[in-house]
Amino acid sequence: MAPLTDATDAYEFPLSQGMSALLGLEELAACLTRARESADIHWTHLVATRLGARLSALGPEGLDQTLLPEAQQWIAFLDAVAERPAADGGKVARMRGALQRLTDRLATDWPDYFRCLERDPWLAPYSDAGNTEGLRPSPRLWAALERTDLESRLESWEQRLEPLATLAEAVLRLTRDSLQWQELTIPPHGVPVALPAEPATGLVQVQTADNRHVPGISGLTTVPTLRLLTTPEMAAPDGDIPLQVGWFTL
């Protein structure tokens, strides 16, 4: 079933630490793009804040526990798909090869890129390692740079993060393209979501027809339950609400 389109609000829920990291990288890349397009220094401050907060988790050791396992599980999944009788072997092989090349490149290039970010004097005040007193910089810090210097700094961060962002984009695109969709009617008390038992990783996307209802999922490690809250009160709706839910797990 195809997801809702047009005036649709989509909410995504990661089912693992690795999937959460992928979504965070996607958000960081989007903020970097916005900062480069905007003359507002608050966007640069936002990027530095989010990048600094994630820096320790983005180290080579951290990636071995988050992003790389996500890509490796997808590679193994594509290997299994290629053996199915009805599979388009050539297409699957191309997807698998592209993902393997991105993974290999990340393993080769990322340690050097990470060290450059780690030693960046403009990023250090935002990181846990560089800010031992816990005092965060003000957005006005970036007013000390000329616009060309500011753009150069943002471009440098974008280039360093490119291997990570490209692999995250590829894995998320594969995951979103694989979502299995179902129409649900959600009563005020919520409804259990029939996810596969003990998924290793994956993504749930909830699409509503308007922005008046905000979904939430609880009990992901037990019995996942999807509930809705009505804005602006953030209270349970008065009646049943139709929506669509898509999920994919590995």
Image (cartoon, rainbow, N blue to C red):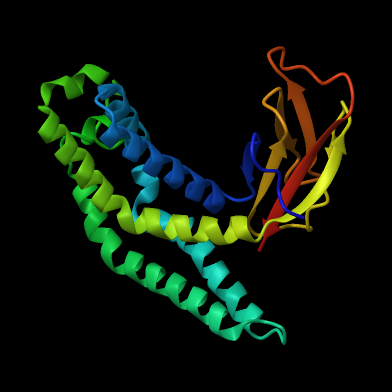
Residue located at (46% from left, 55% from top):
169
Q: Quadrant of the C terminus?
A: bottom right
When the figure is inspected, residue 26 is found, relative to residue 230, above or below; the finding is: below
Is residue 146 rendered to the left or right of residue 53?
left
Is residue 141 rendered to the left or right of residue 162?
left
When the figure is inspected, residue 241 is found, relative to residue 119, above or below; the finding is: above
- Viewer-closest of 34 and 215: 34
Is residue 179 rendered to the left or right of residue 136?
right
Residue located at (83% from left, 21% from top):
237
Residue 61 appearing in the image:
no
- Viewer-closest of 83 and 88: 88
When the figure is inspected, residue 57 is found, relative to residue 198, above or below; the finding is: above
Q: Position of residue 248 (x, y in %)?
A: 68, 57
When the figure is inspected, residue 141 is found, relative to residue 190, above or below; the finding is: above
In this rendering, the count of numbered labels is 0
Q: Position of residue 36 (x, y in %)?
A: 26, 36
Quarter of the image holding residue 231? Answer: top right
Quarter of the image holding residue 128? Answer: top left
